[in-house]
Image (cartoon, rainbow, N blue to C red):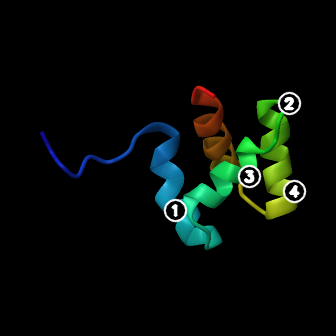
Amino acid sequence: MPTDEKPSGPASYFPSIEKKYGQPIEHWLELVRNQQGMKHMDIVKWLKAEHGLGHGHANAIVAFVLARPK
């Protein structure tokens, strides 16, 4: 079994998100976790408008957070 498995799904975007926006992925995950009661696309729009993320990156972060049990 390989020890350097590449992440799949939304997590596969995390290295490029960190590189492009200069923040650790945990920063973005925490921002999304704090958006209580908002729908997926509303959070994506918020990340794009307030933090300048591209659509794909914002969508990946939101999908990752919302897929995790609370």
Q: Given contact means CB atoms under 8 Å apart, are the residues at marks 3 and 1 in contact?
A: no
Is 53 situated above or below 67?
Answer: below
Picture residue at 65% right of the left edge, 48% below the top: 56
Lower position in the chain sequence, tag 2 or tag 4:
2
Instruction: Read off the residue under disc 1.
Output: 16
**Label 1: which secondary element:** helix
Q: Given contact means CB atoms under 8 Å apart, are the residues at marks 2 and 4 in contact?
A: no
Q: Residues within 10 Å of mark 1 (few under 14, many from 20)?
A: few
Decide if residue 12 is on the left or right side of residue 33.
Answer: left
Q: CA distance from mark 3 to mark 1?
A: 18 Å
> Which amino acid, by three-letter code, is at mark 4?
Ala
Picture residue at 51% right of the left edge, 62% below the top: 16
Lower position in the chain sequence, tag 3 or tag 1:
1
> Which amino acid, by three-letter code, is at mark 2?
Gly
Judged by depth in the image, the label closer to the viewer, 3 or 1, is 3
Lower position in the chain sequence, tag 2 or tag 3:
3
Picture residue at 84% right of the left edge, 46% below the top: 45
Q: CA distance from mark 2 to mark 3?
A: 13 Å
**Label 3: which secondary element:** helix
Q: CA distance from mark 3 to mark 4?
A: 14 Å
In this rendered view, identify the residue nearer to me: 17 or 38.
38
Instruction: Read off the residue under disc 2.
Output: 37
> Which amino acid, by three-letter code, is at mark 3?
Leu
> Which amino acid, by three-letter code, is at mark 1?
Ser
Q: Toward which corner of the image does residue 38 lie, by quadrant?
A: top right
Q: Return the x and y of residue 36 as percentages of the image width and height.
A: 83, 36
Instruction: Read off the residue under disc 4.
Output: 49
Instruction: Read off the residue under disc 3.
Output: 31
